[in-house]
Image (cartoon, rainbow, N blue to C red):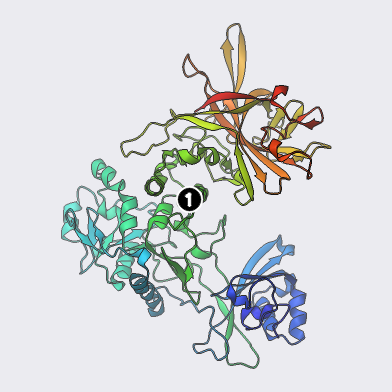
Amino acid sequence: MCCSVCGCLGFCDKSPWDGFGPSPRGGLAVFASRTYDDIKDSAHAGCEFCDLACQAYKLLDYAASKPEVNIHVHQDSAAEILAITHDRGDESDSIQIFACTEKPVAFKQFGREVPARPDSDESFHFLKSSYDSCLEHHPDCQQTSSILPKRLVDISKSPNRLVEPGPGARAQYAALSYRWGHWKSFTTKDNVESHKREIDPKSEPTVFQEAATVARKLGIDYLWIDSICIIQDDNEDWAAEAAKMAQVYENASVVIAASSVFNPGMSFLTHRASPFESSPLNFKGSSTIFRARKRPRYGLHSKPGSLKKDPLDIRAWVLQEEQLARRRISYSSSEVQWKCKTIESCECRGAPQARQSSLFGPKVSQSDLHHDWNQIVKEYTSRQLTRQSDRLPALIGLARKFESITSGTYIAGMWQDNLIEDMVWKRDGDAGFRPPDQLNAPSFSWASILGSISYQPGRWGYRGTREYHSRLLHVHIPATADGLDSGLESGFVVLQGPVMNATLSSPKPEEPGSYRLTVGDRHYFSEVIAFDEGLECTCEFTIDLPLTIHHDRINEGYSRRASRSLKPGDTLNPVDFVPVKLLSLYSLIQSSGADVYENFLILGQRANPSQHEEEYERIGIGTGKVFLQTGDLSLSKLDTPFRWVPDNGTLAQETAQGLYRKEVIRIG
């Protein structure tokens, strides 16, 4: 009989778990929270698998912490025990338990030992078998030979040398993805000709040599490395070849990622920075050997939003190299990992897994594609850039690919056919709440601020319908020579939608991110969800950047306006009841008809750019919420804009009350 406490960690064929199919190995199964004492008592009662869990905690020094336990059983990998220790500030760790005998007598192997060194025969076998299997069995990954880049490193014989294959030449080649760090340029005008004769092995950085070793193991004779194959001090060559980098990574037979190292002088092939450390467990009544290990969270195993990542994986430029590669080998801090368009695999798992939905996988709708683009942007903005001005250029390769799939029009990191929903981004935390030095993007684009962003206001996981209040009338974004815009600040969009007047204040000057939005006689505070007393409605909002006040002379008087034109080092002046406009974008009406979420932009007026029309800039995003009891309002009225704004103790209902009006708004 399967244990009701631990589910036999998924090693038992009989399962009492409801909702997870006939066996816990049929898919991911999650056993609800247990305490350490629950596991220990079950072990004392005779469950050998609970005893394995107890041993694991003792070996990893968890028994004394009395952790809360969740048991996760995956279909094709080790059982995972998530331990949350509240006396350590809700610290959590994941512990894996797996059977590891070469010829298991009673239990299937759902995990495997990871070799101590990435240059071991076992690691190269994993790598070569993954590559060969992909070539033979994955039709979606096929393109075994490609038109070659202008230059490549010929690694077929020693010494390596730089070659120029000529137009239209085809062959297999590998591309290297790595961090430059503070490494100097490699190929220059002075040495390009000598590199064509031979590249001195003594001058080649360790990462370059090791990448060549890996490529040779796969039977590949050519390797593309940007600092060798692009003449670094030739502006014309650099501009021409750098523009093709996304295509180079996409067409490579395989991308080799030196994920674990900070610069080319370090080795990714001779040691692991954060190796798996496992301990044997005593299992009664079987020759099967079980082991426990704390699971490192790198690469494929990294948690969303985790700050613990491989050095390469925190770089924004690298994201398009990851996403565009048809096959990618990552030498992470703890193991070798494989990813192609079909599967994901790694040294610690017993079997490959189908590739998770990606930007370029099969989709059922344009909406799915745009949602995936938003996820790409969220991940991209969480990564680091050396130069702020690269905020849009470092994404251009992915934008070009997305454009080829959807035939969409690219607008400063967003897409014209999804612009209303793309605009509901918000600053994610305080890291980006500072004036940028140089960002060439219009205010409605996420690229106009620093740091990471999220699309939390979009509530993509909520079931319901979207009622759009605004529509796009016109777009003006200067196009660059490559046919995709660079999002220059001179760009703007024109929207038509319902607008309500409000004021913005900073009640706590000592807290730069603290703002108060006043709508009528109601006050709402940034990053705070506060309900109006007696009413089931509220509002939350976020300001994009620190604001400053401008006083514009108009006839005999002055007009005040809030602006995001603050520069680094400028004095932050208090904002006190400055007029702003709220432009309603759309409402999400949940399927139950009980809750309504209305997203709106907070706009400040710019100094008039011409004598003919007003222009506004985005300064924030907000969501008005109405939580209704069934029957409070008919469904036909739920799509009315600004229903969350109270009017004399009731919910606002009619346009005739003058609470809002339709306007045409130009946003730069």
Q: Residue at x 54, y 62 (%)?
A: 302
Judge from the rendering whether residue 128 lies leftward or rightward of residue 521; answer left or right: left
- In what quadrant of the picture does the N terminus appear? bottom right
- Residue 131: where, in percent of width, then height? 36, 71
Q: Residue furthest right?
A: 534
Residue 623, image x, y percentages = 66, 38
Toward which corner of the image does residue 646 lie, by quadrant?
A: top right
Which quadrant holds residue 638?
top right
Q: Is residue 184 visible?
A: no
**Where is mark 1, residue-wise?**
369
Q: Is residue 198 visible?
A: yes
At horizontal 79% and vertical 40% (from top left) the residue drawn is: 632
| Residue situated furthest top in the rendering | 556
Q: State the image coordinates of residue 504 (x, y, percent, origin top left).
A: 67, 27
Q: Is residue 327 left or right of residue 534?
A: left
Determine the secondary structure under disc 1. Answer: helix
Compared with residue 172, is residue 307 higher up or lower down, i.e. above or below? Answer: above
Please tell me whether residue 213 is drawn above or below residue 360 in the rendered image. below
* Residue appearing at x 47%, y 72% in the figure: 352
